[in-house]
Amino acid sequence: FDKDPYKRASAAYLLAHIENAHELSCILASQIYDSDPHVRNSVLRVLGSLLSTEMIDDFPKEAIIEALNFPNLTDRNKALYVLSNIALNIKNHQYILQDAGVYLIVNLKMKQPNLHSFAYSILKLISGKNFNEHDYAAWERWLEEELS
């Protein structure tokens, strides 16, 4: 891996041309923890794009869940983008609920539209509920009931 973060970020876009979606997802998922925010952003963008067209059952979701709690808003926004594509597969709903539910509520409460809106759409998708996007108490009650 190159010391230059701009080269590492560019590499994510070059790697996007790997034809094996599972291989690509595994390579990129390990780079979500890169020390540079540009690299993380590029990696998450490519993963989100990949998962918008490919269904990868054994995608390493743990890193995405962790990124929902990263301090950078851009990391969380891109992680929500990736998670929104993972959530399209109903098989992932229970996993997302259990492992990301709390982070989704936290991001739902954010004032930044790119965090709030993604969290809201994911919650609606995995819950089948249509609570108001600002009815945090209803979403928290639903999550608590589901997790108990």
Image (spheres, rainbow, N blue to C red):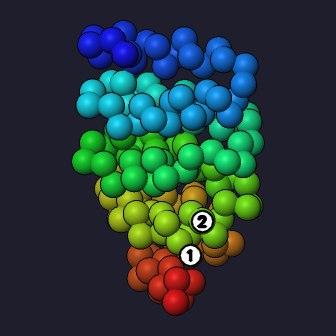
When the figure is inspected, residue 12 is found, relative to residue 48, above or below; the finding is above
On the image, the x and y values in percent for residue 70 come to 30, 48
Q: Quadrant of the N terminus?
A: top left
Q: Which residue is mark 2?
A: 95
Q: Which mark is residue 6?
A: none
Chain-order first, disc 1 or disc 2: 2
Q: Residue at x 44, y 80 (%)?
A: 140
Q: Does residue 121 appear to the left or right of 133 in the view shown?
A: right
Q: Quadrant of residue 4?
A: top left
Residue 133 visible in the current orientation: no
- From this view, report whether residue 124 is shown above or below residue 147: above
Q: Report crowding for label 2: few under 14, some 14 to 19, many 20 or more residues within 10 A (C-alpha).
A: some
Residue drawn at the location 61% of the way across and 27% of the way down: 24
Residue 131 is labelled as: 1
Is disc 1 surrounded by few (<14), some (14 to 19) or many (20+) residues within 10 Å? some
Which residue type does callout 2 highlight? Tyr
User: Percent position (x, y) of residue 98?
Assistant: 53, 71
| Three-letter residue code for mark 1 | Phe
139 sits to left or right of 37:
right
